[in-house]
Image (tube, rainbow, N blue to C red):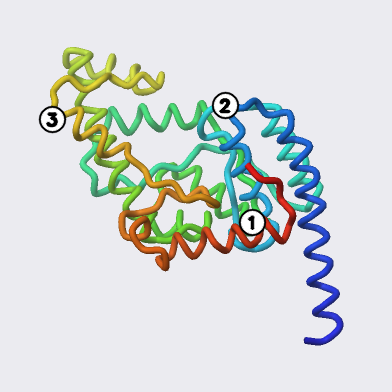
Amino acid sequence: MDGSALIAIERDVERSRGVSAALAVALARVTRDRRDEAWQDGLDLIAVIAGLKPACLLGRGARDEAWIDGLHAIAVREGLRSVAAAAWEPDARAAALPGWYLDATARRRAALPVLYLCRDAATLAKVAALSAAGRVTVADEAAFLGYPACCVAQHHAQTLELERLLAKMAERAAWGDLTGAARMIEAGVEPLPRSREEWASFESLTAIAPSRFTSVNMCDACAADGDAPAQILSRRYETLAARAQYPAR
């Protein structure tokens, strides 16, 4: 390895450690109930900077605006690009979801944008286009978020099955009034299952196998095999966290 390569590596290490230090200060202000999610947000940001993933997103779950603003400021300082846009959902072209449900979820996504942080302008443009489309393929989500395709494929399949169940329950709760059912979905109101079979289906479709060091929900195959793609990716993030001196959870 020549001297210029060694200098580049040392510069990258110092940059990652500087970002980690800034993130540690921001994390100290996050409430305990949000810390795990915020901690993963921070490591995802470091992964984008390090080139492990082209983009990451903030604000999909419970929102801590101060944390998001702080992370955004760090990302901008590091030269990343950002866009506030609709969250992605799985491609539903083959899912036979009713039109009223698709329209309602599109309106909900538009009303609750998330923040995408991207490595460069080209990635930003592609991410913005995908967000405008609203629903994305397995290949696109895997590519832009740096996830294993097998895990994304299972997540998409489960999510679409869950959406079918939610649409059915919303329509039933609204007594067949599709306008009323659409208002429920747009407002984020999820009717509860009624039968034992519906509860079993709901619990199965919402079950996840989280990865320790990534934001990936592992597929069954990855969760069962320590040498599967999601497990390997988690170890790469663990190494990145140690190298960057990122604080423990």
Q: Residues within 10 Å of mark 1 (few under 14, many from 20)?
A: many
* Residue drawn at x 58%, y 43% as measured from the top left: 57
Classify residue 243 as left or right of residue 130.
Answer: right
**Label 3, on which residue?**
197
* Residue drawn at x 24%, y 44% as measured from the top left: 95
Labels 2 & 3 near each other (Cβ < 8 A): no
Where is residue 229 shown, x and y percent of the image? 43, 65
Q: Which quadrant would the N terminus be assigned to in this image? A: bottom right
Where is residue 118 shown, x and y percent of the image? 64, 52
* Residue drawn at x 57%, y 36% as measured from the top left: 114
Q: Earlier in the sequence, mark 2 or mark 1?
A: 2
Report the front residue among 193 and 100: 193
User: Residue flagged by tag 1: what amino acid is it?
Assistant: Ala
User: Residue flagged by tag 2: what amino acid is it?
Assistant: Asp
**Label 2, on which residue?**
33
What is the quadrant of residue 168 in the picture?
Answer: top left
Q: Earlier in the sequence, mark 1 or mark 3?
A: 1
In front: mark 2 or mark 1? Answer: 2
The secondary structure type at the circle numbered 2 is helix
| Residue 84 visible in this rendered orientation of the protein | no
The secondary structure type at the circle numbered 1 is helix
User: Residue flagged by tag 3: what amino acid is it?
Assistant: Glu
Q: Earlier in the sequence, mark 2 or mark 3?
A: 2
Classify residue 211 as left or right of residue 123.
Answer: left
**Label 1, on which residue?**
47
How many callouts does the rendering have?
Answer: 3
Classify residue 21 as left or right of residue 149.
Answer: right
Report the front residue among 200 and 176: 200
Q: Is residue 178 above or below residue 7?
A: above
Q: CA distance from mark 1 to mark 3?
A: 41 Å
Where is residue 124 shown, x and y percent of the image? 62, 52
